[in-house]
Amino acid sequence: MEKRGLSTEEAVLLQQQFGLNQLPAPSPTPWWRRLLQQFNNSLIFILSIAAIFSAALGHWVDSGIIVAVILINTMLGFIQENRAEQAVAALQSYLMEYSLVLRDGHWQKLPSANLLPGDWVRIENGERIAADLHIREAHQLQVDESLLTGESVPVDKQPINDNELGVLHAGTMVSRGSGVGEVFAIGGATSIGHIQKLLAQTKAGKSPLLIGINQLSRWLGLGVFLLAIIASLIAWTHGDSLEFAILAAISLAVAIIPEGLPAVISISLALGVQRMAQRGSIIRQLPAVETLGAVTVICTDKTGTLTENRMAVEDLRLTQNDPESLHRALENMLLCNDAEISDVGQGSGDPLEQALIRYAHGEDGALIHYQKRNPRLDTRPFDHESPYMATLHADRIAIKGAPEFVLQHCFQELDQTVGFWEGVISEMANLGLRTIALAEADISRWSSLDQGGWRWLGVVALLDPPRQAVPAAIAACRGAGIRVIMVTGDHPRTAATIARQIGLVDAGSVRVVDHGQWLAASPAERQQLAREVNVFARVQPTDKLELVKTLQDEGEIVAMTGDGVNDAPALRRAQIGVAMGLSGSTVAREAAAMILADDDFAHIACAVAEGRHIYNNIQHTALFMLPTNFAQGMVIFLAVIFRMILPITPLQILWINTVTAITLALVFAFMGADKALMQQLPRPIAQPLLPGTLWIRITLMTLFLVMMVFAIFKTGIAFYDVVHARTLAVNGLMAMEGAVLLAMYGSWRNDRGDWILIISLVVMILLQALFSQLPFLQLVFQTTSLSLNDIGIIFLTALLAWLAARLILHPLQTFTLKS
Ligand code: ADP
Ligand code: MG
């Protein structure tokens, strides 16, 4: 059949006429709607009530300030949310789809968005159809059209001759086989375009952490409410006016609520997702970020993930050592092959098949056009259940596949030499080489090829070296208490050798389980295998799913990689499904929580480290903000029930909270990772953000701060008036917060976080200077200028706070340290 496709010149013209192969994007939520959503928050709600009460009592300044705080916080939340959304939108561009397109007579990998009517495209098992196509060639092609029809049974497809079956629709999935199609409609003109549905989207699910924080703030809200009632009742029974009682309640509310916390947490998540994308792991489901930090087992493919997937033929063993046999084998390598090498040496397609072509061309230059001269009449594509590929030609069937499988089908013919060949194959595999058997059959056998009767030609061994960064990444995982399990379709001995080379198992004998052993094992035995064995070879996709389930029954948090269509169930089942960005199928990608941009295992280890880092930063933020808020609440509560003068007024508390949220608390979002994080065991997934031990630290820190505030205020009162003493108390508290931040930050990290730390401290000090010295702010917040002596006192408090924080909060070890 003549294949035409488009030329580059035609494509340029058509592009102007038809535009890009994209569906029009749905309209985003309008900004004002997102702004309004910020008010749907219990903390903001309580503040609003406080504002209304203050206004009703005629305290206009208070009310105005509370409203200002509400506005600042909603703006902060709004900006962070925008930022998170932009991060997600940026990820979309990484998720770009590619198609194999015939342009200028060559198959080329182009972005699917550039497809044009008239283009010829290759269709491969596991891919999503990128445009509406007429089928020109089909090999056991089956398509899942449930997206359009709702019918989940795959439909058989044949080349077009004016029938329904000859058409492929954009957005549907190829569930089996392969073929070639010609584009007839793109973008909005496709049938899916008419239905208007966006494909391959990043899911922005709410992270469990944010849900947890919202719950925490709801509890805080309730607690604040109860405390406020108690405080005002006590005040009232003491004979204070109702007005005083209500003001006390309002003060408590604004004191305890950590207004900035949710915003700081969402910015931490957004920044983390961006950092991961820069390092090659693209998050498709935001909740995965936190789960990553808790991963206990990583199950990974071998070829392409642990190894480079850049292969070269190392060895070739044939039945006879004569030129005739060699030529037959080289022809076979070229015939049974989907890859292509251009005239300038540029390869496309499966690296293993590229290596075979390069080898055959190298051995015999006359074979360069052999493929073109012997066109293929039909194809039996490779799949993992029966791992072989066959092509039908005028004079023979060319076959290649996994050696044991091919041997079985050559049984009658080989007879006594089977044992010899098995020896050759394991010898090659022992060297870590990837093995592939070559065979032939008569064309009459095409319809019953599965029944055997093949002629054995020999076996090829290919070298696929481990990726450079992999041994270090595996060591890092093992040091972090994470097990790495290799799950491969390759030969058990090849798998064992590579596993040893990359340090996945210790030197010595390696235990390997293959498909047969796994299948024969009872559930109890499987549990034991899953616990003890780190290399699984010749596995089939269903084994992967079973392995994930077995590990999960053992309580493990599993990350599982996969590339084929059949891997999708295992990817969906694992807590973290990881798909391949380069080699993976679209089906696998859509089932995954995370995508590896360049298939490299090392990026999984980085992502786990980043997951731990983000979680740790968020924990630090909560640990930093809560003691201050609780201390403020307690100061007011105590002052009210013991009828003392308030050391800090509600307005001043609002000032403190706002300044903290826009300066100090933000530092944690940018803080670099602590190296010790990857030397600890994974965090138990069920452990709350703030486990019991952290609440003890929060309580101790709170008590310390309460004591200090009273101490500063009493000192102030002894020498000055109330206004001066309060100014001193506010500045003392802010200085202590700065000192606590420094203590928690720990050592200098030489990254962006250091600069953010310095900037935020400087801005905080400037704001405090304005707060104390600027006449206008003095009027609003009832403050007064400080003397040098005062500044000395403030420094002293800060120093004490630093020491206390070092003792109580640092170092923050929330996971069990490995011995
Ligand atoms: P892996 O887990 O290493 O990626 P695969 O499941 O892809 O392994 O391959 C399993 C076996 O199938 C390989 O060891 C090889 O012998 C055979 N095989 C791989 N690719 C092809 C192919 N394109 N054609 C024929 N046989 C193949
Ligand atoms: Mg593979």
Image: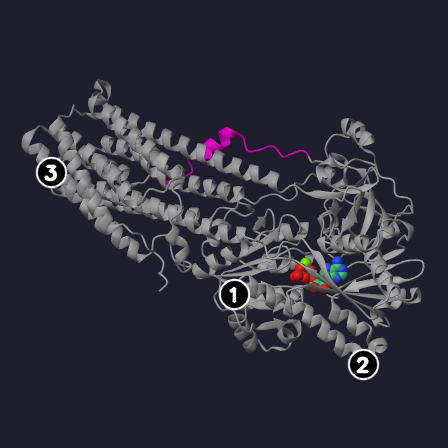
As drawn, the residue found furthest toward the top would be 775
Q: Is residue 188 left or right of residue 329?
A: left
Question: x and y percent of residue 644 in the render?
Answer: 11, 38
Mark closer to the observer (2, 3):
2
Q: Earlier in the sequence, mark 2 or mark 3?
A: 2
- The residue shown at (23%, 51%) is 808
- In reply to whether residue 450 is colored magenta, the answer given is no
- The residue shown at (34%, 33%) is 662
Q: Earlier in the sequence, mark 2 or mark 1?
A: 2
Residue at which label 3 appears: 644
Tag 2: residue type? Gln
Residue at which label 2 appears: 416
Q: Quadrant of residue 519?
A: bottom right
Give the magenta range.
Answer: 24-43
Structural distance between the alpha carbons of marks 1 and 3: 57 Å
Q: Nearer the viewer, residue 135 or 811?
A: 811
Mark 3 residue element: loop
Q: Quadrant of residue 537?
A: bottom right
Structural distance between the alpha carbons of marks 2 and 3: 101 Å
